[in-house]
Amino acid sequence: MQLEDLASKMKTENESRKFKLQSIFNNNIELIIAINKTGIKYEIIHKSIELGLTFTHFKNLVHRARLSCNSSRERQGIVQKSNEKIYEKKKEVVTQKNLNSKDNRSEEQRITDWQLNTTIRLPISIINELEENQINYEGFLSLNIKTNTQIRKHLSKLKSNKKYLR
């Protein structure tokens, strides 16, 4: 039953030409894995889907879809764990900070604000460095920076300028 549903769903997505082949596999990888775990081999799944692919191509698409599925889950877990660790570390620092400081928000809220208001995915270390250099997300957006490499170059320039100002 599941195999027939998967086959018809993937065929209609492929025939609609709205999706790339890899995105079709990415969207259906959990169902493919579930069917495989019930004991149905990939060869049988490949034959029933009938997308005109060689078995090697099919295995390659499944492999890449599994990697993207796992990496997105890991990223979510890593971000969540790192936010928890940082929150615990910063909790101690916040108690030591002056109450008159401008930023009394929690670390988690601060990171969330950055991620929601910027167009690129920023690692927490870069967010902390930007804030240490008194750059908030509004100021960051005005810099028109599009990659993490550009951010690093900008932060390096700021650091070198600070050395000369001392």
Image (cartoon, helix red, strand yellow):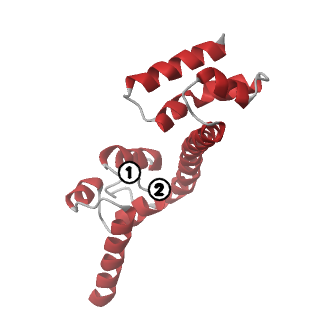
Residue 106 or residue 111, whichever sits in front: 111
Residue depicted at x 58% and y 19%: 7
* Distance from Cα at disc 2 to Cα at disc 1: 8 Å
Q: Residue at the top extreme?
A: 1
Query: From this viewpoint, which residue is outermost toward the right?
Result: 39
Marks 2 & 1, CB-CB < 8 Å contact = yes
Crowding at dot 2, Cα within 10 Å, few <14 / some 14-19 / many 20+, comes out as some
Quadrant of the frame with the C terminus: bottom left
- What residue is at 45 percent from the left and 26 percent from the top? 14
Mark identifier at residue 19:
none
Foreground of the two, 152 or 109: 152
Q: Estimate the x, y position of residue 126 in percent, counting from the top left.
A: 42, 62
The correct choice, above or below, for 5 with respect to 87 in the image is above
Relative to residue 149, is residue 95 drawn left or right?
right
Asked which quadrant contains residue 68, the reply is top right
User: Mark 2 or mark 1: which comes first in sequence?
Assistant: 2
- The image position of residue 159, as x and y in percent, is 35, 79
Q: Residue at x 77, y 21 (%)?
A: 38
Q: What amino acid is labelled 2 in the image?
A: Val
Residue 94 - label = 2
* Residue 147 figure quarter: bottom left
Q: Which residue is mark 1?
A: 104
Image coordinates of residue 103 in percent, x first then y, are 35, 54
Please state the horizontal and vertical placement of residue 60, each as a whole percent of the image. Answer: 61, 43
In the image, what residue type sits under mark 1? Asn
Note whether residue 105 is visible: no
